[in-house]
Amino acid sequence: MPGMMDNLSTINSFLRTLIALAVIGAVSVVSYFGYAKFNASSIEAETRARELQEAQASLLEVKRDLQAAGVALQEKDAKIEAQVAEISQLNQQVQKLETSLALLKVDHRVARLACIDQSKDESTGKLTTLVEFVEINKDGEPIDTPRQFRIPGDTVFVDAWIVEFEDKYVEAADLERGTSLLLFKRLFGNDQKPDDGYPLDEHGAAPKAYARGGKMSDFEKSIFNDFWSIANDKDKAAEKGIKANYGSADYLKVEKGKTYTVELRASGGPKIKPE
């Protein structure tokens, strides 16, 4: 009996040891899997955190790139707007210049000259020409009574006083200084002394092509009544915006039956041209 009891005790001890080992093994296995699972979760969390940080960094970089692109775009837009404004300003300057040049080149018809007849004196061999002179408006209509003059020779001189104003007044189409002024003085032929020529507009009378309402303006009167004094005094001329005032005689060899136009440029003297 005692031997059996000892064997049972040994078996129990062995079983307890075996159970303890099984329990320890089970606990170890559970602990291992728990640790592994926890560790895996931790690693996954770290990975996710790192990926999140990388995504945030990428997003921040993209945001910075977008901001930089936005600034560059704004700068580009501002530059384009500045260029557009500059181009617009240049276009305006070009248009103004073209207008100014056009105004400076405008020819105004101020008189018509017709060669009515030409005859030759058989005894002297000298040629005389009968011409008709009349001042006209911009539509080519007479503004006074046509006058006829017989001149010695076949070349007609038209003598006049001209007043040219500063270009800025011509460009701006100034009411009183937007074009040159002209006062016809006399008409004579090539075989005739100028002083022996035929008077056209009288001194102090209204230049017919520029009379306002049939009456010379005070401004025009102040110029033509003091013409040569102004011509010799640059301060007086500058005060009235005058670039130059002078006498000029344009001339042309005329032919019987032909008609000619006396034209005045906005910034120049008279020119005789065939119609």
Image (cartoon, rainbow, N blue to C red):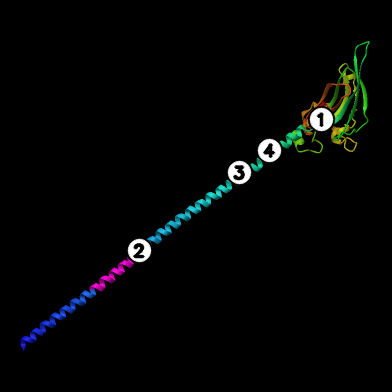
Residue neighbourhood size for the residue with mark 4, other residues' Cα within 10 Å, grouped as few (<14), some (14–19), many (≥20): few
- Name the residue: 58% across, 48% down: 78
For this orientation, the residue located farthest to the bottom is 1
> Residue at label 4?
94
Which label's residue is closer to the chain start, 3 or 2?
A: 2
Q: Taking 129 as reference, is 51 above or below it?
A: below
Residue linked to disc 3: 83
Q: Which residues are magenta?
A: 28-46
> Amino acid type of disc 3?
Gln
Helix, strand, or loop for circle 3?
Answer: helix
**Mark 1 to mark 2 CA distance (whole Å):** 95 Å
Find out whether residue 38 is within the magenta segment.
yes
Image location of residue 274, percent across then percent down: 83, 26
- As measured in the structure, the alpha-carbon distance from the residue carrying label 4 to the one carrying label 1 is 25 Å
Mark 3 vs mark 4, CA separation in Å: 16 Å
Say if 109 sits above or below 40 in the image: above
| Residue 230 colored in magenta in the image | no
Residue 46 numbered mark, or none:
2
For numbered disc 1, what is the local secondary structure? strand
Question: Disc 2 on helix, strand or loop?
Answer: helix
**Rendering coords of residue 28 (x, y %):** 23, 73
| Outermost residue toward the front in this view | 257
